[in-house]
Image (spheres, rainbow, N blue to C red):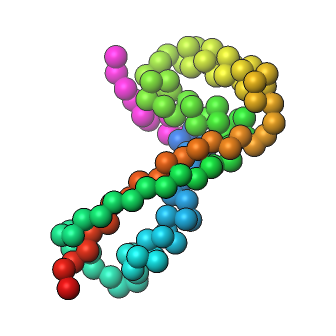
Amino acid sequence: MTVDFGRTAVDYAAHRAGFPEELFRRLGDMGVGLQGQRVVFTGLETFSFDVDIPYSHEAWRGRMRTCNGIGATLPGPVVADFDNALARMLASTFPQEPLAVPHRVWALIARSPA
């Protein structure tokens, strides 16, 4: 099976959530990523947090098509069948929009020793 992410580029660009503003706020509060700052990879720290990302049904379907096991791998007619089945499931099970989809944000920062 060949994976071709080029086949999902349009959906990826339109429907994948970027980094939430909360990440940049937290990094700024930690003194990371400030203008003119040079980063040296020594003292490593990680953190993660969860945020809900609002998706319309159409956007969530596009997001699902970006998955490597769907849009980047399956033949077009199978992707269309999956998308239609997902549309029906969303309409019947989660009719209210937008959907609040949990999103895990994970970051790695490095600090230079004083």
Q: In terms of image quadrants, where is residue 61?
A: top right
Q: Is residue 13 visible?
A: no
Please tell me whether residue 66 belongs to the stretch shown in magenta: no
Report the residue at 27% width, 79% height from top. 38
Report the residue at 30% width, 64% height from top. 45
Q: In terms of image quadrants, where is residue 112?
A: bottom left
Q: Is residue 9 visible?
A: yes
Q: In terms of image quadrants, where is residue 57?
A: top right
Q: Is residue 80 above or below residue 36?
A: above
| 66 horizontally vs 58: left or right | left
Residue 10 coordinates in the image, percent (x, y): 55, 40
| 45 horizontally vs 83: left or right | left
| 110 horizontally vs 113: left or right | right
Q: Is residue 7 above or below residue 83?
A: below
Please tell me whether residue 2 belongs to the stretch shown in magenta: yes
Q: Quadrant of the N terminus?
A: top left
Q: Quadrant of the C terminus?
A: bottom left
Q: Main secondary structure of the magenta part?
A: helix
Give the magenta range.
1-10
Residue 30 coordinates in the image, percent (x, y): 41, 76
Report the residue at 63% width, 14% height from top. 81
